[in-house]
Amino acid sequence: MGVHTTVVFADLFGSTGVFETLGNAKATDAVTQATNWVAEKFAAKGGKVVKLLGDGVLATFKKSPDAIAAVVEIQRSYQHRLASLSPQLYMPLRIGVVRGSVVVVDDDCYGDAVNTASRLSELAGPHQIWVNDKTIENSPKLNDVHFRFLGPIAIRGRTEPCNVYQIEWQEDQNSEYFTVQAPVNVISTTPFVDALGGQIELTHHESQQTFQAFELPIHIGRFRKVDFIVNDPRVSRTHAKIEWRNGSFMLVDESSYGSWVRFAGSGTDLMLRRDECVLHGHGQIALGTSFIDPSAPVISFVVR
């Protein structure tokens, strides 16, 4: 018999790089400290910690509003924790939250809600919280918290798409994102078009190209044989690639100096160094140097 609950999966982004930099012993200690910290926070907020999975934590909450309040507070607290750590230990959180049915066996839980929460955590970028629509139904509005509809997203292993929202939790966020009550009743009647798109448009100065999902992967760099050329000495010969993976556009950094992603309306930039993130909506990608540099080579992207 299934139990209706809210499943939360929190994952440390960038832990692979920490193992490469620090070695197994020190990295294991850092990851363990971080996951234990997250687990303790879940428990303190009324959640049940099901298990720790390497660099992730699986927990459940009886009520979705409690889960939302918990993950928002944890992200805010974790930001302060990150600021006190060495840059070598930089592992931001990404969190997936799903309301659904699970089967409990020997204090462990299984089912579509668990799989989907884990997948949303994988798809989310650093510092982000992605939730399904059932999670935020009838949830009260929290101070400085907004819900941005990302659309129906294809989830590996599911025949039906998942209607996904991103929780904008930054306290200084000046956002026009709508809150939960208005759109939830609308999206159920919308025919499925994967919100992460069937094509992506890239623009750099006068160069503009559109790539269909079936044309991917494509490579970005300053080498003349790549698919999208950005002629700047700070850009690696093959700097990054964009893949179509399980219904998502994935930006994969392959450079020496990194890439930065800025989503329209977001209060933070994502730094990728041999890491990856999902591209959705529209925004910009800076190659080889951050957006702080006004001369940074920047690509604008639109996912349709």
Image (tube, grey):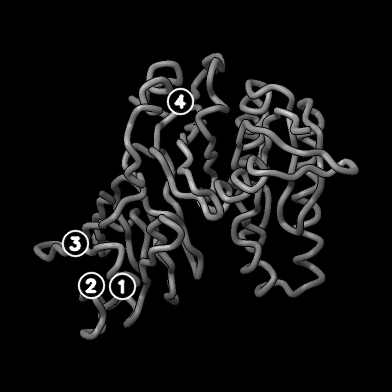
Determine the image quadrant of residue 113.
Answer: top right
Upstream in the sequence, badge 3 or badge 2? 3
| Residue lying furthest right | 106
From the viewer's perspective, tell me whether residue 276 is left or right of residue 103.
Answer: left
User: Label 2 near label 3: C-beta < 8 Å?
Assistant: no
Q: Taking 18 as reference, is 237 above or below it?
A: below
Q: Is mark 3 on a helix, strand or loop?
A: strand
Residue type, label 3 = Thr
Q: Which mark is residue 210?
A: 3
Q: What element carries label 2?
A: strand
**Residue ID for mark 1:** 218
Percent across and percent down for residue 274 are: 50, 70
Q: Is mark 4 on a helix, strand or loop?
A: strand
Category of crowding for the residue at label 3, using alpha-carbon neighbours closer than 10 angstroms: few (below 14), some (14–19), many (at least 20)? some
Q: Give how far apart the Cα atoms at labels 1 and 2 are.
A: 8 Å
Front disc: 4 or 1: 1
Upstream in the sequence, badge 4 or badge 3? 4
Q: Residue 228 carries which label?
A: 2
Q: Which of 194 and 170 is in front in this view?
A: 194
**Residue ID for mark 4:** 146
Q: Give how far apart the Cα atoms at labels 4 and 1 are.
A: 34 Å
Percent across and percent down for residue 49 are: 81, 39
**Residue at 20% across, 76% down:** 231
Front disc: 3 or 2: 3
User: Label 4 near label 2: C-beta < 8 Å?
Assistant: no
From the viewer's perspective, tell me whether residue 62 is left or right of residue 148.
Answer: right
